Amino acid sequence: MNAALAAGCAYVDGQYVPIAEARIPLLDMGFSRSDCTYDVVAVWQGGFFRLDAHLDRFDRSCACLQLAPPVGRDEVARILHECVGRSGLRDAYVEMIATRGVPNAGERDPRRITNRFYAYAIPYVWIANLDQQAKGLHLAIARNVERISPRAVDPTVKNFHWGDLVRGLFEAYDRAADNAVLVDANGFITEGPGFNVFACYRGQLVTPAEGVLHGITRQTVLELAAAEGITVRVGRVEPEMLREASEIFLTSTAGGLMPVTLLDGQAVGTGEPGAMTLRLRERYWDAHRGGQWVTPVHYPGG
Ligand SMILES: Cc1ncc(COP(=O)(O)O)c(C=O)c1O
């Protein structure tokens, strides 16, 4: 194993390099115009979790943005295996990125630029640290910033337009919270920086239908809840519903299900992670230990 790759391995310009040495060209429109899409899949205990679902979403995101990366789906999968395999990481955060690319001098027509593909694997990333996972997070409903309109940036296409989400985070910190969820122009709950939101409201699980990324973790929770006989309503979620909720949790590839026990400084339910949250979180991690959703990583010599 190459020790320089243990902190992460990137794929740039057809080469595998240590993450600390990975560079993208300054003139890539992915950087200068946010003209790109990406996806993140987790590797847990040596297996990709729901790799096909992530590759499907990535394909769809590329098509929506009229991006045609130079590598097809099978090649993307092979590169992701290589990045993880070469790093030797057993638990990893694995990102694939398609960018518009580097224009020829003076070129401003996005149709005339050759698109690029990058990927990397780094150690698994947690949105909530261990203490926060045990005690639950303090979530703020952002007041000073709203989620960018879905008519401007389609939230179902995974994107780097994080200006609103980052402003939300700073607002949360100013209010002594750990993280923020944003509302849309009509005041309905959407999502936060890197996660979807669920609440247990009047005995039913609810999560926003629109104005959000269709998170793979969100989808997994919907499927696990159905298997557990838990009713989920996917629809409009008002801030009041969160305030009255007995449980709230966040979902993301970067951390799974994360309980929220304080909302705008007020206890959620009993102020402890809720029973439904804990049950679904357990099912979620159980599903990582093997079964239909797990694809073993091809490690060198393994
Ligand atoms: C804005 C946003 N919403 C939701 C999610 C959660 O999606 P997933 O469960 O596929 O990681 C993410 C993940 O990065 C995100 O960026």
Image: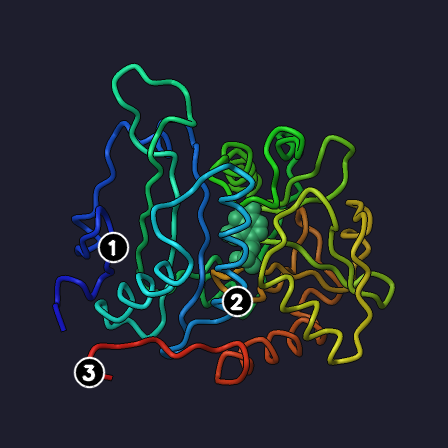
Q: Is residue 273 left or right of residue 52?
A: right
SS type, badge 2:
helix
Q: Mark 1 is on which residue type?
A: Ala
Mark 2, residue position: 133
Q: CA distance from mark 1 to mark 3?
A: 20 Å
Q: Does residue 263 appear anywhere in the picture? A: yes
On residue 58, the disc is none
Q: What residue is shown at x 74% (from left), y 59% (from top)?
A: 199
Q: Are marks 1 and 3 in contact (CB under 8 Å)?
A: no
Alpha carbon of mark 2 to alpha carbon of mark 1: how far?
Answer: 29 Å
| Percent position of residue 69, x then y | 38, 45
Q: Comparing marks 1 and 3, which lies closer to the viewer? A: 3
How many marks are shown on the rendered structure? 3
Q: Which residue is mark 1?
A: 10
Rendered residue at 23%/48% (across/down): 12
Q: Residue furthest top?
A: 106
Query: Disc 2 or 3, which lies upstream in sequence?
Result: 2
Query: Quick one: label 2 or label 1, which is nearer the N terminus?
Result: 1
- Secondary element at image label 3: loop
Q: Which residue is mark 3?
A: 301
Q: Helix or strand or loop: what does disc 1 sit on? A: strand
Which of disc 3 and disc 1 is earlier in sequence? Answer: 1
Judged from this view, the residue extending furthest toward the right is 202
Q: Quadrant of residue 123?
A: bottom left
Give the residue type at disc 3: Gly
Q: Nearer the viewer, residue 79 or 162?
A: 79
Instruction: Looking at the picture, tell me which residue is in the foreground, 125 or 225.
Output: 225
